[in-house]
Amino acid sequence: MNFNSKKIVIITCFFIILSFVLFCINLLKEKFWGETNIEIKKDEKMKEESYDIDYKEESTINVKITSTNEVIAMDINDYLRGVLPSEMPPYYEIEALKAQAIIARTYLYRKINDGGHEAGVDICDNFAHCQAFYNKEKILQIWEQKGYDESTRKEFWKRVNQAVVETSGQTVRYNGEYIKAFFHASSPNKTEDVSQIWGGASYPYLKSVENEEEEDYPNRTSRVEISKDDLLSKIDSIDESRYNIDDIQSLDIHIADYTTSGRVKNIEVCGCKIKAEDLRTYFGLKSTDFTIEINGQNVVFNVTGYGHGVGMSQVGANYYAKQGKTAEEIIKHYYTGVDVVSSK
């Protein structure tokens, strides 16, 4: 065999060996990545299915059902799954739901640390002085009454469960203490500084902050019209000794002053100052961010926003979640200088 023939044989053998090596590499690659993709899909499927399971926290609290005065012992996660959709729409962005779950858990722990609702009761189901709560059966019934089909109801519950499970053990703290986790529905421009209402108590984490919300929220603006007689009668019934407006005949009414966030702090009726928070409560105003106009013998309140304005805006939380903010980022926007701490 001459030199050229040997050269051809060597080159041919080289390419045969190279082809075999590449074939083996490709085979191993397909096997490895195939198994990896199967594992990834398996993990994703397991994670998705896990939200069908109502995981327990294995910590029990006593919840008072105010309609029956019954006190029920329940797992904390069961309680939170009942609070979350009672306080926030289940179709909100998942990071907004997770922020609400963390806030609800913090509210509960602070309530317990402060002595609970009453003797033998950690918290109740009345939103006026605790947090709104319905059990799973009632929540599913409410969704059905609103016209959501079974598939949608299941998806809603899965989202609620996901928000509770993925934030398990997480609370909001300031200098190591659970915060007073106030929240409300909507503050289209700014939230309220807590020192401006409720007797002037101040907390460094409950400051007024800038806020953005989508403009299609149905309760963004509202209008309440009250007759002169109804207005004066109701104000007189609030606290006669405080307001002393007997025999007032004229309808001299105007805004007296504003809070630091721009909401109404007091109105003045014939020289008597009336707290805007009292008006919100007694006349069903959705917030104290309003203007006043006189329409004949009636007073018209043109209202912006919904709720007391302190702490997290739920509509705002949903807006920021749509912008890519995480639950922790949302919380830290609304509560100044806080930490989101996990006990796990």
Image: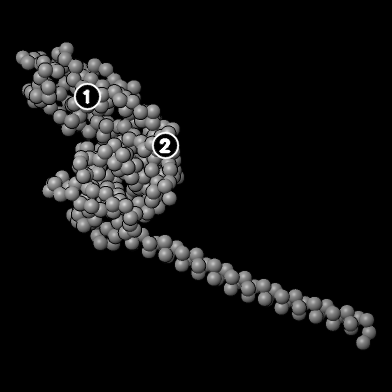
Residue at (43%, 46%) from the top-left corner? 342
The quarter of the displayed image where residue 226 is located? top left
The mark total stands at 2
- Which x, y percent locates residue 63? 22, 48
Label 1 element class: helix
Residue at (20%, 29%) from the top-left corner? 280
Can you say which quadrant of the picture contains the N terminus? bottom right
Label 2 element class: loop
Residue at (29%, 23%) from the top-left corner? 200
Mark 2 Cα within 10 Å, few/some/many (few <14, many 20+)?
few
- Which x, y percent locates residue 34? 55, 71
Q: Which residue is mark 1?
A: 276
The quarter of the displayed image where residue 125 is located? top left
| Front residue (pair 317, 105) | 105
Q: Which residue is mark 2?
A: 176
Q: Residue furthest top?
A: 271
| Residue 152 versus residue 175 in the image, above or below | below
Q: CA distance from mark 1 to mark 2?
A: 34 Å
Q: How is the image coloured?
A: one colour
| Residue 114 versus residue 193 in the image, above or below | below
Q: Amino acid at mark 2?
A: Gly
Using the image, tell me which numbered label, if any, was put on residue 307.
none
Q: Amino acid at mark 1?
A: Ala
Earlier sequence position, callout 1 versus callout 2: 2
Residue at (24%, 43%) from the top-left corner? 123
| Front residue (pair 306, 170) | 170
Left or right? Give the position of 230 relative to 75: left
- Which x, y percent locates residue 197? 27, 25
Please say whether residue 158 is visible from this viewpoint.
no
**Foreground disc of the pair 1, 2:** 2
Q: Residue furthest left?
A: 247
- Which x, y percent locates residue 186? 30, 36
